[in-house]
Amino acid sequence: MCVGAAQLFVVGHDAGHRSFSKNKLVEDIVGTLMFMPLIYPFEPWRIKHNHHHAHTNKCALACQWPSSCSMVNGGLSGCRS
C-alpha cells in the first residue's frame, strides 16, 4: 500500500512541476487524480511546493522545519536568510 501511495505521489509530483505533459490542463487533471487517493489537494500543494523550490536555502522564506530555523538563522548553518 505504501509503495502504491509513493508511486501516485511521484506522478503527481511530476505533474506539479509541469514536467509530465506539455498541456497544463492534462497536468492539473493527472495531478489531481494522483493526489485524490492520498487525500491531499493537488493545487495548494503545487503552489506551496513550487514556492519551496523558488526559495531553496532562503530560510526566512521557506523554512520547512520551524524548530531548526533558529539554529539556521543563528549562524549554525550555511543557509542564506
Image: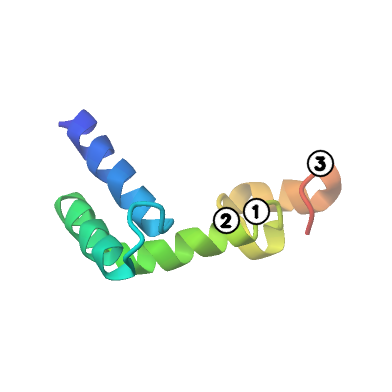
Whole-percent x and y of residue 11? 29, 45
Whole-percent x and y of residue 22? 36, 61
Q: Residues within 10 Å of mark 3 (few under 14, many from 20)?
A: few
Q: Residue at x 17, y 57 (%)?
A: 33
Query: Callout 1, which amino acid?
Result: Thr
- Identify the image quadrant of residue 28: bottom left
Quarter of the image with the N terminus in it: top left
Instruction: Name the side, left or right, on which 2 lies relative to 64.
Output: left
Q: Nearer the viewer, mark 2 or mark 3?
A: 2
In what element is the residue under mark 3?
Answer: helix
Instruction: Name the side, left or right, on which 39 lies relative to 76.
Output: left
In what element is the residue under mark 2?
Answer: helix
Q: Nearer the viewer, mark 1 or mark 3?
A: 1
The answer to which of marks 1 and 3 sits earlier in the sequence is 1
Q: Nearer the viewer, residue 13 or 1?
A: 13
Instruction: Name the side, left or right, on which 57 lies relative to 65.
Output: right
Q: Residue at x 38, y 58 (%)?
A: 16
- 7 above or below 34? above
Q: Which residue is mark 1?
A: 56
Q: Which residue is mark 3?
A: 76
Q: Residue at x 68, y 52 (%)?
A: 69
Color encoding of the figure: rainbow
Quarter of the image with the C terminus in it: bottom right
Find the distance from the CA under tag 1 to the CA under tag 2: 5 Å
Q: Which residue is mark 2?
A: 53
Q: Residue at x 25, y 37 (%)?
A: 7
Whole-percent x and y of residue 66? 59, 54
